[in-house]
Image (spheres, grey):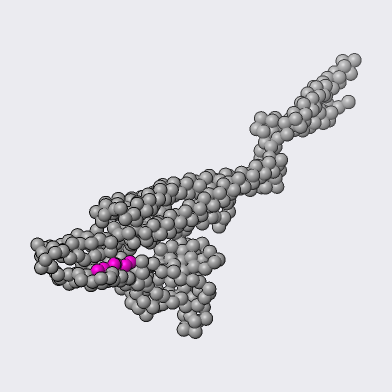
């Protein structure tokens, strides 16, 4: 028996330390709920779980981004719904004006309401915003540039690939223009006719009073009047093939119809542009449609480009149009770089809907039966454009809803994977804690016994 070194006590103390260390770890896991509380617990597991936690937080933020994007789309779609209601009303008024039971004054009253409704369309489009960002003024649409002035973009579809397109102006649009002559009858009554409106001329009239009557009627119909009394020239304020004037001078037995002309352009296909040392993405399969200054280029693949001619361009001029993939609103809907979704909010205005020209002149006027009939078609086309726009936004919103659902599922799965690495299995941890507590108590008791062993030496020394 030895008293300098109590080997039994050292062994018992070592076992107690081990048991206490394990019990402390179990207590930490039970109290925190985490299986890994420090890198020493599981270095590889900690690294993996940190990556997962970072991904989960990013995915949750991406889900909130997608939700914000859905709110933006709903804001724009709500404004478009109101614009569509306004256009439905203008179409209804056009149908009313097309009825010949209305006089020119009646139709002018209808036209004034249409003008106010069109002003409201522009107002809604220019003021609709989300968090300070305008949505319908074209500031969140794809960027289109021109190498020289004289053209502007009214919008491009998603089917238009980024690149350079080239077109040549063959002819500029023209307004409808015609001459009207009149004289004062010596006796009886004569008349002249402008569109559907007849103006009676009596011997008591003068050339100037008749001129004033003509001016009043033409102001209602948005027709400019030039020339002197007795022989005037009438010119529509708007240009294009849809603009026409029906005239009948004094003494004429038939009406004369004068019509405007649409612009004409030529598209440079890839081969022609390359031969001329230029560059064009047109394939040669596109079709053209015209409406005054406005040109629509489209094909059956979803390609649609709307261009308008501006002041200063001349027949024979060629312009390069560059379309970019930038400019649309980007929604970050993923956890990593470039995981975004582009939402294009095109410009909506009476100009892009081809109801007004750039200078504000109306392209529709219902102060004649023919003008009211053409206005019905013009508003039909505008309503169809808005409907297509709303349909695209609705499809995008549905896509965002799917994106949010996908993000939620991903977050759930990644969270479950991280839980298997990080979270404490409480049942297992409690079982281990109970075992380690018993071992700690046993080691403590044995340490007490081992510490008492040197006392036995005293019995020998006292003997």
Question: What residue do we see at 39% from left, 67% from top?
Answer: 291
The quadrant holding residue 413 is top right
Residue at the extreme front of the image, as rendered: 188
Dominant secondary structure (helix, strand or loop) of the stretch shown in magenta: strand
Question: What residue do we see at 25% from left, 61% from top?
Answer: 197
Residue at the extreme top of the image, as rendered: 463
Most foreground residue, 152 or 233: 233
Figure quadrant of the N terminus: top right
Segment colored magenta: 243-248
Most foreground residue, 210 or 443: 210
Is residue 101 rendered magenta in the image? no
In the drawing, does residue 236 fall left or right of residue 335?
A: left
Horizontal and vertical percent for residue 261? 35, 72
In the drawing, does residue 247 fall left or right of residue 352?
A: left
Is residue 247 rendered magenta in the image? yes
Horizontal and vertical percent for residue 175? 30, 70
Question: What residue do we see at 29% from left, 58% from top?
Answer: 367
Horizontal and vertical percent for residue 58? 57, 47
The quadrant holding residue 312 is bottom left
């Amino acid at each position: 028996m030895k008293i300098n070194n109590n080997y039994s006590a050292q062994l018992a103390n070592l076992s107690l330390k081990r048991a206490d260390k394990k019990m402390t770890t179990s207590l930490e896991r039970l109290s925190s709920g985490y299986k890994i509380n420090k890198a020493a617990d599981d270095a590889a597991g900690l690294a993996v779980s940190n990556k997962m936690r970072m991904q989960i937080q990013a995915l949750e933020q991406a889900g909130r981004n997608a939700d914000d994007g859905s709110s933006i789309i709903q804001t724009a779609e709500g404004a478009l719904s109101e614009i569509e209601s306004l256009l439905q009303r203008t179409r209804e008024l056009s149908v009313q004006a097309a009825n010949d039971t209305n006089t020119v004054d009646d139709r002018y009253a209808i036209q004034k309401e249409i003008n106010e409704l069109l002003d409201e369309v522009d107002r809604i489009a220019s003021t609709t915003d989300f968090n300070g960002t305008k949505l319908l003024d074209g500031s969140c649409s794809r960027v289109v540039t021109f190498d020289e002035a004289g053209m502007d973009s009214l919008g491009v579809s998603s089917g238009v690939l980024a690149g350079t397109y080239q077109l040549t102006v063959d002819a500029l649009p023209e307004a409808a223009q015609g001459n009207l002559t009149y004289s004062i009858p010596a006796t009886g009554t004569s008349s002249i006719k402008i569109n559907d409106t007849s103006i009676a001329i009596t011997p008591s009239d003068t050339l100037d009073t008749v001129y004033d009557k003509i001016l009043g009627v033409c102001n209602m119909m948005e027709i400019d009047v030039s020339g002197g009394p007795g022989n005037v020239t009438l010119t529509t304020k708007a240009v294009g093939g849809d603009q026409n004037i029906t005239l009948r001078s004094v003494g004429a037995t038939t009406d004369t119809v004068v019509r405007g002309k649409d612009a004409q352009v030529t598209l440079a296909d890839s081969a022609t542009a390359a031969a001329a040392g230029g560059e064009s993405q047109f394939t040669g399969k596109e079709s053209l449609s015209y409406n005054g200054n406005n040109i629509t280029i489209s094909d059956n693949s979803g390609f649609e480009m709307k261009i308008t001619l501006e002041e200063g361009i001349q027949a024979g001029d060629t312009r390069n149009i560059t379309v970019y993939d930038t400019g649309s609103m980007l929604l970050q809907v993923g956890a990593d770089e470039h995981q975004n979704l582009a939402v294009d909010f095109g410009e909506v205005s009476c100009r892009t809907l081809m109801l007004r020209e750039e200078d504000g002149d109306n392209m529709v006027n219902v102060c004649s039966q023919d003008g009211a009939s053409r206005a019905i078609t013009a508003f039909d086309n505008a309503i169809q454009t808005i409907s297509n726009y709303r349909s695209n936004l609705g499809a995008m919103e549905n896509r965002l809803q799917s994106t949010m659902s996908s993000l939620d599922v991903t977050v759930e799965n990644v969270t479950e994977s991280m839980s298997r690495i990080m979270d404490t299995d409480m049942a297992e941890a409690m079982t281990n804690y109970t075992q380690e507590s018993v071992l700690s108590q046993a080691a403590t008791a044995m340490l007490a016994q081992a510490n008492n062993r040197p006392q036995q030496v005293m019995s020998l020394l006292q003997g």
